[in-house]
Image (cartoon, coloured by chain):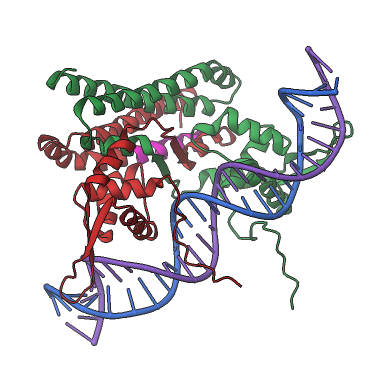
Chain colours: A red, B green, C purple, D blue
DNA sequence: ATGTGCATGTAAATTGTTACATGATTCA
DNA sequence: TGAATCATGTAACAATTTACATGCACAT
């Protein structure tokens, strides 16, 4: 019987996985430990990409194996910790990925919109309520994003323009949906007022 | 040794899964077979929800077990086929779900935005190209959605208002993002023209 | 002493996709 | 007769999340 390697590390493929590129990008932006990467994701790209802690550590390993990042033990007191930096090769690989014309699939999974789609099964006032809920959700999201905007503008002033761009895209997207909700609220309440 | 049930049908839980509700909703709208449900999804909600064929048939089974839909064999010639209809209980369950105030998480996974976020690692003209690519992607999406609009308007005239609502939400969302892209294209090309 | 934050890691479960397998019907 | 479409189903695979497990540091 052969000794099987049961550890579930990702297979060594030619292509890096998407999470690995995300980790690489975050290391480039200054996140040093797995812990810091997770935090950076939550503070920035969480609106269009999430990554769980269980994906980060294997990705770091994978990246280091290829020499795209280099890590060294950097304990804080007696608490263990491994700090990473991006390498020259890593910089190149990241840029290549950014320039690569791959699909970049836009995947939206939104049960809110699904419910809205089926809302003709409801009474008119119930449907109206649903539209209002969906609108409120986007309004909350816009407020959250607007609260981050100053930080994005500051970063833009210091040469990191693109986080602000993605922030504005999020705001614009939800703002657009809010307007449509308002239009349909009028439409639904005029025909049969509450 | 106990006889294990190795078939991978979904565990019988209190809660129905999201795909099951999607299937239920589509059966209500007149999709009869698993095949028709898959088609209906591709023709309508695919922009904010997808479902693979491998999820549909177990969902149908699950729904029938609970009496939310009822199915009968309805072969076309000698080709086997099972046709479903929504039951009274199914109508109720669907409406309850639509009214239920659960999270309805909006989940976006977009490597395009991720790349944009990291685009400060690129030269200015390369970043500009990326912005243009992302803009083009949204423009294509808007065109696709606009092509469906007449069908949505027709459905709205016949009492199915909400598919048009979700269609307009998609258009508005991408239109908003397109405007932001244009603004940044100006910004990027003014400072250092190609 | 105790709760929160820093820090890393793994096992199990869940969820979803892709590919395969089968076979009838319709139309060119 | 051969391709496209209708129709159902499963096995294998891939991706991701959740939960668990561990332990130090620091402030209250």
Q: Is residue A43 visible?
A: no
At which x and y percent is residue A161?
18, 34
At which x and y percent is residue A160?
16, 37
Q: Tell me what residue is drawn at x 45 percent, y 46 percent.
A: B104
Across the whole image, how many numbered discs are drawn on residues? 0
Q: Tell me what residue is drawn at x 19 percent, y 27 percent.
A: B124
Magenta-colored span: A124-138
Q: On screen, B60 above or below B159?
A: below
Q: Is residue A23 left or right of residue A18?
A: left
Q: Is residue A192 left or right of residue D27?
A: right
Q: On screen, A95 above or below A66?
A: above
Pick the residue in front: B88 or A66: A66
Q: Is residue C9 left or right of residue A31?
A: right
Pick the residue in front: A52 or A125: A52
Q: Magenta stretch: residue A98 in it?
A: no
At which x and y percent is residue A139?
31, 38
Pick the residue in front: A97 or A123: A97
Q: Tell me what residue is drawn at x 54 percent, y 21 percent.
A: B152
Q: Is residue B90 left or right of residue B3?
A: left
Pick the quarter of the image with the N terminus of chain B: bottom right
**Quarter of the image holding residue D28?**
bottom left
Pick the quarter of the image with the C terminus of chain B: top left
Pick the residue in front: A177 or B76: B76
> Looking at this rendering, what residue extends furthest in the right direction?
B78
Q: On screen, A122 above or below B97?
A: above
Q: Is residue B50 visible?
A: yes
Q: Principal SS element in the magenta part? A: helix
Q: On screen, B31 above or below C26?
A: below
């Amino acid at each position: 019987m052969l000794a099987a390697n049961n550890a579930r590390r990702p297979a060594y493929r030619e292509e890096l996985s998407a999470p690995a590129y995300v980790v690489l990008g975050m290391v480039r932006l200054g996140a040093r430990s797995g812990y810091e990467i997770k935090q950076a994701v939550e503070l920035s790209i969480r609106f269009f990409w999430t990554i769980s802690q269980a994906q980060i550590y294997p990705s770091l390993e994978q990246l280091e194996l290829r020499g795209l990042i280099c890590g060294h033990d950097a304990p804080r007191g007696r608490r263990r910790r491994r700090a990473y930096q991006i390498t020259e090769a890593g910089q190149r690989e990241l840029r290549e990925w950014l320039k690569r014309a791959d699909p970049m699939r836009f995947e939206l999974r939104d049960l809110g919109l699904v419910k809205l789609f089926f809302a003709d099964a409801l009474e008119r006032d119930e449907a109206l309520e649903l539209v209002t809920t969906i609108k409120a959700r986007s309004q909350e999201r816009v407020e959250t994003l607007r609260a981050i905007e100053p930080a994005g503008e500051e970063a833009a002033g210091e040469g990191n323009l693109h986080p602000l761009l993605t922030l504005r895209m999020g705001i614009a997207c939800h703002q657009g949906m809010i307007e449509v909700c308002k239009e349909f609220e009028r439409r639904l309440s005029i025909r049969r007022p509450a």
